[in-house]
Amino acid sequence: MQELAIEIKNLNKTYHKVTALKDISFAVHKGELFGLIGPDGAGKTSLLRILASLLIPDSGTAMMEGFDVVKDYKEIRKIVGYMPGRFSLYYDLTVEENLSFFASIFGTTIRENYDLIKDIYFQIEPFKKRKAGNLSGGMKQKLALSCALIHKPKVLILDEPTTGVDAVSRKEFWDMLKQLKAQGITVIVSTPYMDEAGLCDRIALIQDGSILKINSPDGVVNDYKNPVFGITADNMYALMTHLKAYNRLVSAHRFGDSIHTTLSTEDDRAELQQHLQTPDIINLRIEKIEPTIEDCFMALIEEKSDE
């Protein structure tokens, strides 16, 4: 049985009349890359701030490496590296000064722990005399990650680290997370990007403060039993209108240049194609596709709303 790095039981948090977290329970294994996947306002930041001992829950418990995040907050801060969603380093300090400052807080130095951050830091080291406020988005991200790692944390908590970063920097960042996982560091990362979910060992899909599902990315997709079709036509508005009028439709959502359409059975395809033979739908194309994590997420939201 795998050892646990994080164990959360019945966690709740409200802000005045707004419920941010509703009875959250799950565990993260040591050395796991675990993703919290959901849109803005889903509760991801509140949960991660509680784990980082920056926010006190209303009820429930959260344990990290055997320490309670409320009672043992001083110990938690020694073993956790935290990277908030917004760049929070000192803009008027240089790259090197920021990193040296964070190292000194934990009684260490850049030289002492350089091996841990070298694969990340070497990319920004040529700019170590540049002020942090003058760095690009991708470079700020690498600096923030270096600062979060400089004290050799056992658990790395990352709150939407790739939001607003270009595609190349996003890929580089996830490559770095895989390297950290290989070193035995437990990583819990939140993201609104469904394509990043597939890069995690396991994911928790979260919406309105509730966990909808926890599984591996493949497990989430494999649990989706209904057939999905990608449907396109010249007039997408008319296509969506007619799809929603089809009485055996399970769901239809716009994904880029097609509409991902879920039916009850694959046998419904022929009837749907006949239903869509109308004068205002031209160049109709229907293709069987594999469901994505986003398809699964949308289906789980609809399931929950029907309860």
Image (cartoon, rainbow, N blue to C red):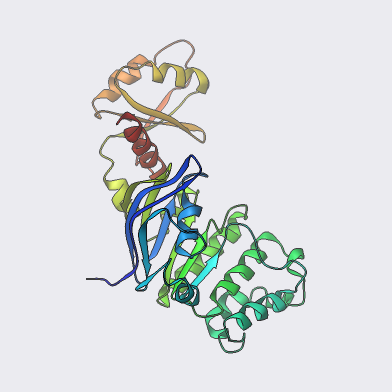
- State which quadrant residue 187 falls in: bottom left
Instruction: Determine the image quadrant of residue 288.
Output: top left
Residue 132 position within the rendered picture, expressed as x and y whole percent measured from the top left = 73, 68
Image quarter hosting the N terminus: bottom left
Tell me what residue is drawn at x 64 percent, y 74 percent. 123
Up/down of 101 relative to 140, above or below = below
In the picture as drawn, the residue positioned furthest to the bottom comes out as 112
What residue is shown at x 33% (from left), y 35% (from top)? Answer: 304
The quadrant of the rendering that contains the C terminus is: top left
Is 148 displayed left or right of 21 in the figure?
right
Q: 191 and 136: which one is in front?
A: 191
- The spot of residue 212 in percent (x, y) is 34, 44
Residue 16: percent from the left, percent from the top? 51, 43
| In the image: residue 293, left or right of residue 265 | right
Query: In the image, what residue occupies the spot 32% across and 52% down?
Result: 214
Could you tell me how many numbered marks the image carries? 0
Name the image quarter holding residue 86.
bottom right
Position of 57 with respect to 146 (left or right) is left
Q: Residue at x 65, y 61 (%)?
A: 87
Task: Please state the horizontal and vertical placement of residue 284, each as a whole percent of the image.
Answer: 44, 22
For the view shown, which residue lies furthest in the top direction? 279
Q: Is residue 156 above or below residue 25?
A: below
Q: Is residue 173 above or below residue 16?
A: below
Please give left or right for residue 202 compared with residue 189 in the image: left
